[in-house]
Image (tube, rainbow, N blue to C red):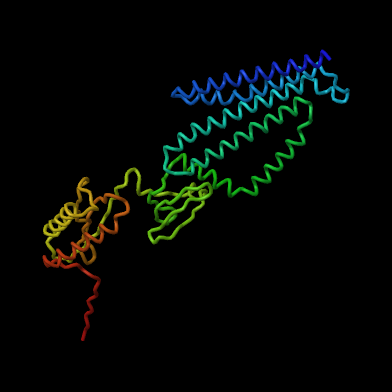
Amino acid sequence: MSNIWMAAAIIAIGIIAAWGVARLFRWLGNKADLTESEFDDILVLSFGKPIVVGILLFSFFLALGYIDIPENYAWILESKYLHALYIFLGAWVVSIFVQNFVALYGRWMAEKTESDFDDKIVHILEVTSRYIIWFIAILIVLSYLEIDITPLLAAGGIFGIAIALAAQDLISNFFGGALIVVDKPFSVGDRVMIEGNLGDVVSIGPRSSRIMTLDYQLLTIPNSTIANSIVTNYAMPDIKLKIKLPVSVAYGSDVAQVKKILFEICDHAVAHSTYILDDPRPNVYFLEFGPSSLDFMIVLWAKKFNMSWEIKDWINTEIDRRFAEEGIEIPFPQMDVHLRE
């Protein structure tokens, strides 16, 4: 009877000790909340519950030594099973620490980007790290208990190969998306050209990215395709866009007068248009003597990459008006036919 009382006393002491440790970690958690660093919060959260559970398990294991256990269940008292439980507790500590560390600092880094894809990656890393840690812990415990894990490893390898082959495209697109997040060739809202497709980036997902074309057609492009393509980003390194407008006049036109008029058009556009920058200043170049025209080039800068059509419309309308007022001829293709008698 005394043995039963001893076992009960040990269990009671273990419960009191676990309660005291729980109160201690609650106090430490309140202190950690007062600090600027989040690392101490992660440490308290990681060790609190596992230590409490470990104290309870150890007290129950000691108490079992004072109880008459049937021979069929005597193996419970072997120390290797207690050590296996401690391995699981250690895996619990590491799992909580890694998961919270990834969640805290991963999301802190993800908040610095406009895309929500990196938030999804952080969540996937949280779940993946937890399963990997527990899988390793199970393998260690099985090996410690002298259970052959070779068939398990072989089955896991075959299963992993089968999954990898079946999800080859999904995996390649996922890692392509990860490369987009890390390399940052574009962000949501940027205007890009990918494989001849011009549009604005709407979203960046784990498998694909979506682009809204200028015709308001939604394109879904696999991330693996983007990772292996040349991407032209019109919003980087900044959002302004260089625009070139060719202008041709007929032979016999006064070149100095044409350049003067084109400069006046550009200056007027800068002063009265909301689309064009004054720095860099617009410029006009006389490029070449064409087959049937004198060819000029206007170079100006749009305030934003999506204003090119508005600028071309504004400038071309002014060129047509001014050339008509000044009597400058805009050439057009024509053919002279000479008949011999």
Residue 189, relative to residue 100: is it above or below?
Answer: below
Q: Is residue 255 left or right of residue 6?
A: left
Which residue shows up at 68% across the image and 43% down it? 161
Residue sitting farthest toward the bottom: 341
Which residue shows up at 67% across the image and 33% down it? 135
Q: Is residue 90 left or right of residue 110?
A: right
Estimate the x, y position of residue 330 in percent, counting from the top left: 19, 67
Residue 155, relative to residue 249: is it above or below?
Answer: above
Camera-side residue: 116 or 294?
Answer: 116
Estimate the x, y position of residue 149 in percent, counting from the top left: 76, 32
Estimate the x, y position of residue 164 in percent, counting from the top left: 64, 45
Estimate the x, y position of residue 242 in percent, counting from the top left: 28, 50
Camera-side residue: 19 or 155?
Answer: 19
Image quarter of residue 337: bottom left
The quadrant of the rendering that contains the C terminus is bottom left
The quadrant of the rendering that contains the N terminus is top right
Which residue shows up at 57% across the image and 27% down it? 97
Camera-side residue: 276 or 5?
Answer: 5
Q: Is residue 317 left or right of residue 164?
A: left
